[in-house]
């Protein structure tokens, strides 16, 4: 088969850890050297910012988006918007290479029709965390979410369909791509406070990209 230079997959074929029906980690699937400049370009057009929750808390994770739709939160609630409320402009387009990576990962786990229209980009510095939540603001809950981790490792909390279900802990490493679909799509999940560290590509920082079908 011919090489596909536009698809930022790192050889050799990655290992995978099945997580449950419709969910798996593809270890070392993403070519980080190719992804990081894309993240920097997105952030140059739509700066990272700390969103406020409807309850009035400022999130410790900084966020931005690319794609036709972007996830936002403020005192009025959570929702997807076509324009960045901070700049008044449309979100920067989803780079083709990022979209191709997300679609290939989804197909590898059994979702060949995934067509993401939103990518939420999270930035963690040491101490930043994400409390347990469900992602259910998307219009198509039948589509999976594909996540790509870059930089410092984090402990991902992977719960059940009820908030009170005790979560499993899963270390997400730089280059890991995780697909969450089917019955795993609505599980409660979170991220422990990021430990200190110094990553060769990102310094004291972790980025996570989540590709979604929001419309
Ligand atoms: C499981 N982000 O942005 S990615 C989020 O590492 C979010 O930044 C985390 O949770 C992060 O909403 C986790 C992995 C992830 C993303 C979405 C999921 C796991 C998921 C949706 C359903 C089930
Ligand atoms: Fe989430």
Image (cartoon, grey):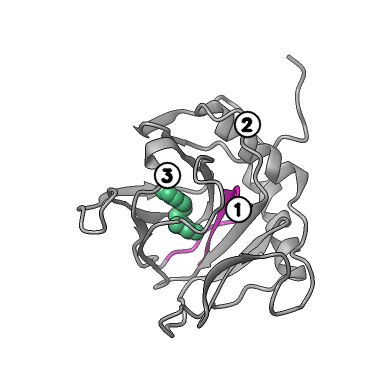
Residue 155 percent across, percent down from the top left: 35, 55
Give the numbered dot on residue 113.
Answer: 2
Asked if residue 70 can be seen in this view, the reply is yes
Which residue matches tag 1? 214
- Classed neighbour count for the residue bearing mark 1: other residues with Cα under 10 Å, few (<14), some (14–19), many (≥20): many
Disc 1: residue Cβ within 8 A of ligand 1's nearest atom: no
Task: Classify 73 as above or below 164.
Answer: below
Residue located at (75% from left, 23% from top): 3
Question: Is 71 placed left or right of 194 in the picture?
Answer: right
Residue located at (55% from left, 30% from top): 111
Disc 3: residue Cβ within 8 A of ligand 1's nearest atom: yes
Q: CA distance from mark 3 to mark 2?
A: 16 Å
Residue 123 occupies which quadrant of the picture? Answer: bottom right
Q: Earlier in the sequence, mark 3 or mark 2?
A: 2
Residue located at (27% from left, 48% from top): 160
Task: Indicate the quadrant of ligand 2 in the picture.
Answer: bottom left
Asked if residue 10 can be seen in this view, the reply is no
Give the numbered dot on residue 185.
Answer: 3
Q: Provide the residue span drawn in magenta.
A: 197-214
Count of numbered badges drawn on the protein:
3
Question: Is 26 placed left or right of 8 in the picture?
Answer: left
Residue 30 percent across, percent down from the top left: 59, 40
């Amino acid at each position: 088969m011919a090489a596909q230079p536009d698809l930022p997959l790192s050889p050799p074929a990655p290992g995978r850890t099945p997580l449950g029906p419709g969910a798996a980690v593809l270890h070392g699937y993403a070519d980080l050297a190719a992804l990081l400049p894309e993240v920097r370009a997105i952030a140059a057009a739509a700066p990272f910012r700390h969103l406020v929750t409807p309850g009035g808390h400022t999130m410790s994770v900084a966020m931005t988006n690319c794609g036709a739709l972007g996830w936002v939160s403020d005192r009025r609630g959570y929702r997807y918007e076509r324009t960045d409320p901070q700049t008044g402009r449309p979100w920067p387009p989803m780079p083709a290479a990022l979209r191709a990576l997300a679609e290939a990962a989804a197909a590898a786990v059994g979702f060949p029709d995934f067509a993401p229209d939103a990518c939420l980009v999270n930035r963690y510095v040491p101490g930043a965390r994400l409390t347990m939540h469900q992602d259910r603001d998307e219009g198509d809950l039948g589509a999976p979410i594909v996540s790509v981790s870059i930089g410092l490792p984090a402990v991902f909390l992977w719960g059940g369909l009820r908030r009170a279900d005790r979560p499993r802990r899963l270390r997400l490493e730089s280059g890991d791509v995780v697909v969450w679909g089917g019955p795993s799509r609505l599980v409660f999940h979170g991220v422990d406070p990021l430990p200190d560290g110094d990553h060769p590509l990102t310094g004291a920082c972790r980025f996570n990209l989540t590709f979604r079908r929001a419309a």
